[in-house]
Amino acid sequence: PIPCVPWQSQLWTLAVTQLVKLQFLPSEAMRNNADLKIAGSRSVLVPYSEEHVAKYHTWMQEDWILEMTESEPLSIEEEYEMQKSWREDPQKCTFIVLDKSLLTEGAPKFGIEGMAGDVNLFLDVEEQNKAEIDIMIAEEKTREL
């Protein structure tokens, strides 16, 4: 069985209720939201940027994460290319989940030390108001909240 955060937790509620408020235009989804931060009481969603790739790559080297996300391991160079392609893809939006309990005062705006997982939205081309949402909480201490 896949261990997961209970649906009503702060992380899930934030992701589901706030992501529906994003600006989704078919050809501009991630670009329209490139500077957006969505803050909840215990987490923050920020756009997946180049600064996040190194830590994300570390997560994606773990066998358990690869299995749960049905992913293949990539080189760090491939991971940077993937981040760029996701940022430019008009049918996807990717945000990094920051766990506020892991953030430190005065930390850089990208919150690398607070990274806990990601949220991916796959926009429905046929119906603009529909999207599939995938949420990965990679940091074990955050999954236990």
Image (cartoon, rainbow, N blue to C red):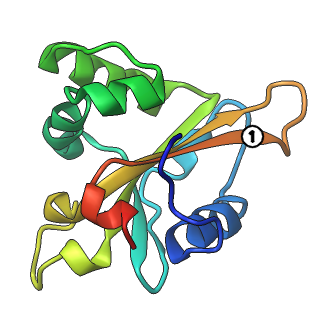
Residue 93: image location, x then y, percent: 55, 40
Do we see residue 28 in this rendering?
yes
Q: Quadrant of the C terminus?
A: bottom left
Q: Residue at x 58, y 65 (%)?
A: 12
Numbered label tally:
1
Q: Amino acid at mark 1?
A: Ala
Name, please, the residue furthest toward the right: 127
Q: In the image shown, does 54 or 117 lie closer to the viewer?
A: 117
Horizontal and vertical percent position of residue 66: 35, 25
**Residue 60 % position (x, y):** 26, 29
Instruction: Say left or right for 4 vs 76.
Output: right
**Residue at point 25% right, 80% down?**
101
The answer to whether residue 121 is left or right of residue 129 is: left
- The secondary element bearing badge 1 is classed as strand
Q: Which residue is rendered at x = 43% and y = 33% of the image?
A: 87
User: Which of the 4 image quadrants contains residue 85?
Assistant: top left
Q: Compared to 109, does 64 lie above or below?
A: above
| Above or below, 42 relative to 137 | below
Q: Label 1 neighbourhood size at 10 Å, few (<14), some (14-19), many (20+)?
A: some
Residue at the far front: name it.
Answer: 1
Residue 103, quarter of picture: bottom left
Q: Which residue is mark 1?
A: 131
Q: Does residue 6 appear to the left or right of 102 in the view shown?
A: right
